[in-house]
Image (tube, grey):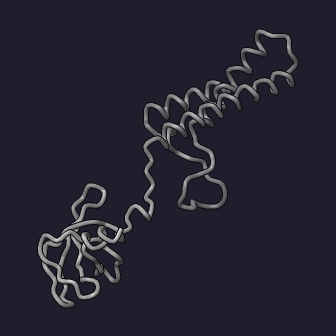
Amino acid sequence: MCFWVGLLLLLSGGLHGHGLGGHLHAGGGDAGGPGFVPILPLMVFVTVWGGSGYVLIRFSGMSVLAVVLICTMIALLTGCLMYAVLARVMNRYDSSMNELDYEQAGQLGYISVPAADGAAGEMKYVLHGTMRSIGVRAASGQQLMRGDRVIILKVDKGMAEVTLFEREFGEL
């Protein structure tokens, strides 16, 4: 019976698309995060447990207790293997957002709107393949002319403090 129920659930999940990414949750209600047991390895466990149990009971002279223990070990091994494969495939292209990847300090760009003596200007820079712009003020009274290459020193309330790249590069 377990074999047929597990097989029916596997086929149903494969045809309808559920079961491959679903999870089983514990406790009262959904916590909003992923569950602790993916449904697919659980369905594989039930199917393998039922199928191997049927074969061993039918074609071997083992006791029921031995068959249950052997089937459980086989099904656990198969379910864990399925879980490992599923986790590897699902996480292969997972690129979680890292706060440091979006850090603006240290970005190199160029001035698109000049700024003189405390006035605000604008710079353009590339971050993750996207052209971005940000308001800028020059550090220590520098004159920022259109086309100057600058480095962002820090960002405060959406306004970047920048310095000329040639000055910083020359000091290195």
On the rendered structure, is 160 left or right of 65? left
Residue at image position (18%, 76%) is 122
Residue at image position (67%, 21%) is 51
* Residue 167 against residue 79 in the figure, above or below: below
Q: Position of residue 9 (x, y in %)?
A: 55, 32
Quarter assignment of residue 44? top right
Q: Where is residue 125 in the image (x, y as percent from the top left)?
A: 23, 65
Residue at image position (22%, 84%) is 142
* Residue 12 against residue 167 in the figure, above or below: above
Quarter assignment of residue 131? bottom left
* Residue 55 against residue 87 in the figure, above or below: above
Q: Split into 4 quadrants, where in the image is the C terminus?
A: bottom left
Q: Where is residue 163 in the image (x, y as percent from the top left)?
A: 27, 77
Q: Split into 4 quadrants, where in the image is the N terminus?
A: top right
In the foreground, 112 or 144: 144
Q: Position of residue 61 (x, y in %)?
A: 85, 11
* Residue 62 against residue 118 in the figure, above or below: above
Quarter assignment of residue 166? bottom left
Residue at image position (58%, 40%) is 39
On the rendered structure, is 94 left or right of 66? left
